[in-house]
Amino acid sequence: MLARGLVAAVLIAAIGSGGTLYAANQSVQGAKKVEESGFDGDAPTAILIEASSGSVLFEKNADELRAPSSMMKLMTAEVVFNAIKKGDVKLTDEYRISENAWRKGGAPSGGSTMFAAINSKVSVDDLLHGAIIQSGNDACIALAEGIAGNEKIFAADFMTKRARELGMTKSTFGNSNGLPDPGNKMTVRELGILARHIILDFPEFYKLFGEKEFTWNKIRQPNRNPLLNSMEGADGLKTGFTKEGGYGMVGSAVQNGTRLIVVVNGLEDPEDRATEAKKMLEWGFRNFETRTLIAADQQVGYAKVFGGESRSVKLVAKTPVKVMVHKNGSDKLIARVVYSGPVRAPVEAGQKVGVVRVWRSGNIAVETPVYAAEAVGTGSTMRRAIDGASELVIGMFRAGAEKL
């Protein structure tokens, strides 16, 4: 149910000269057009995200499932990072390089490898370096087998379960490393979600993505990310290639305190991949700036309450709601509060009620949770009866409208 009490005047004052903000209840759908975004690119699928707010600056076929190739190693890395954070795995733990890991991902495979020796034991720390910096398929298989006992189990259970916990509803995984498998499918949007999560939640591990080389088994290999040596502030994340998926990349850079994340996939040439990613990042840094729409703890609207002492409850965002807008102030922003309601009393202060969504040029730019600003106790028997009758009438009206 949509709240109809969005405080439009407050939001308009907050945006200042960064664009025009509208309070609205109507749905806004459709992909952003090239002429509206001001950017045109050659990548079949692409997305550009501001890391702090999650604001989407540009997208093109962002929800199209494609083979993610080695970019999928980000999911394997995240599962390991999370296991370390929970205490289930230690960086000093050692996993054996099985014959399966050696043949499928090691030197005999002819693919990207950290050149770990068969039957050797390698620490989780070194395997992460090999997987992230050298894109080692053997390192990923060894991590998967060490944690789950079997790579298929790791992909089906550990990777899929973790992806769903992170809100990645479309991604599927057939192995740990992105080697050709019909089960390996991800969208650039979900790769962007994953990259943002790693950057924000695992800063101590994210540093690995910026390391320019790693030596294992006396073989020194450079990081495969071309942005590290060609763009100011670039420090991650991962490239990928398979014949099925084409050339892709997840990249990130920081300039003037702003971090952007770019994902491209489906390109036909590795140079085009690097060029597209760099061009999109530079466009974002050049044309956008961050504006605060709603301050922390500022009222953003209200939600209807069922059976409460009050008919409604004020809603606030605990953190500032920020969005990236064009520097020229041409953006039209639409904001609305979305929640399932009416909210049943009693309502606790600080209780999460819904989200405030902000659209820019027809696409969701940012979504932030909103919470009850105050407690609302249970109302009288008469109040609950009146609210129940009101909801019954509204429900009958809706049911009749749906039949028309």
Image (cartoon, rainbow, N blue to C red):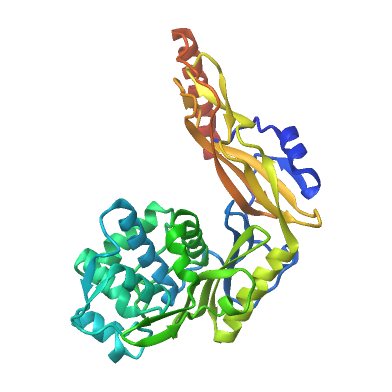
Q: Is residue 271 left or right of residue 331?
A: left
Q: Nearer the viewer, residue 301 or 228?
A: 228
What quarter of the picture does the C terminus occupy? Answer: top right
Q: Position of residue 124 (x, y in %)?
A: 29, 68
Q: Position of residue 368 (x, y in %)?
A: 56, 43
- Tag count in the figure? 0
Q: Is residue 360 visible?
A: no
| x 31%, y 85%: residue | 217
Q: Nearer the viewer, residue 24 or 348?
A: 348
Q: Is residue 80 left or right of residue 379?
A: left
| x 30%, y 63%: residue | 91
Most extreme residue toward the front is: 218
Q: Position of residue 84 (x, y in %)?
A: 31, 57
Q: Is residue 341 left or right of residue 115?
A: right
Q: Position of residue 173 (x, y in %)?
A: 35, 68
Q: Is residue 392 above or below residue 27?
A: above
Asked where in the image residue 314 lies, by quadrant, the reply is top right
Asked where in the image residue 220 lies, by quadrant, the reply is bottom left
What quarter of the picture does the N terminus occupy? Answer: top right
Q: Is residue 141 visible?
A: yes
| x 52%, y 70%: residue | 236
